[in-house]
Image: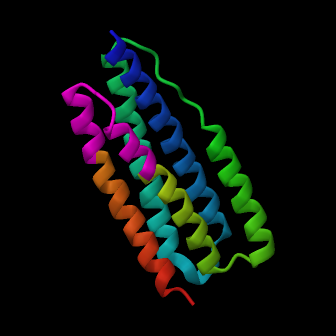
Amino acid sequence: METIEKSVEVLNDLIQLNNDRVDGFTRASKELSPEDNDLQNLFTMFAQDSRTNVQELTAAVAQLGDQPDHGNSITGTIHRAWLDVKATFSGHDRKSILEECERGEDAIKKAYQSALAEELPATVAVLLSTQQQKINEGHDRIKLLRDSAV
């Protein structure tokens, strides 16, 4: 029983963080200049990936017999507020937006690593490993773009 409760807690945390990721990339998209169309498409794709993650995580919580969370984390709210402040001072430039997105990607990447360190049912661990792989790919792509931004 304890493993199920812990699994639900872990899944709900990841639901909240994926909701934060959707909100973060949506907010970052609004800060982009018209010439940053490549980032617009990328941010839209990452937000959709997280929406899919939320659907899968929600189904996993339901399979464990519990109710999924649908909100955002307090940390995510702080992250979005920081993005607002940073954009105000940075003039919405590509590099600063990518730096902030990378910071958000660092947080969700770390959350998946922590989640997978927990004792979880095999089906949940497989789901999280699959999602983690896409999260890591997203992080690496943002980092590469940030490193090449002027």
Q: Is residue 82 found inside the magenta-colored segment of the image?
A: no
**On screen, residue 109 above or below 148:** above
In-front residue for pair 100/40: 100
Q: Is 123 left, or right, of 106 in this rendering?
A: left
Quadrant assignment, res 143: bottom left
Task: Identify which residue is drawn at 42% across, 30% down.
Answer: 10
Name, please, the residue furthest toward the top: 1
In-front residue for pair 6/123: 6
Task: Identify which residue is drawn at 31% across, 46% down.
Answer: 131
Task: Identify which residue is drawn at 37% across, 32% down.
Answer: 57
Q: Main secondary structure of the magenta part?
A: helix
Q: Is residue 120 found inside the magenta-colored segment of the image?
A: yes
Q: Report the quarter where the N terminus lies.
A: top left
**On screen, residue 92 above or below 53:** below
Quadrant assignment, res 122: top left
User: Residue 79 at x, y = what percent?
Assistant: 66, 53
Total numbered circles: 0
Name, please, the residue furthest toward the bottom: 150
In-front residue for pair 43/78: 78
User: Residue 149 at x, y = what percent?
Assistant: 53, 86
Q: Is 29 left, or right, of 57 in this rendering?
A: right
Q: What are the residue bounds of the magenta stretch?
A: 110-130
In-front residue for pair 28/33: 28
Q: Is 23 left, or right, of 64 in this rendering?
A: right
Quadrant assignment, res 71: top right
**On screen, residue 144 above or below 48:** below
User: Residue 98 at x, y = what percent?
Assistant: 56, 72
Q: Report the quarter where the C terminus lies.
A: bottom right
**On screen, residue 130 above or below 123:** below
Rendering colour mode: rainbow
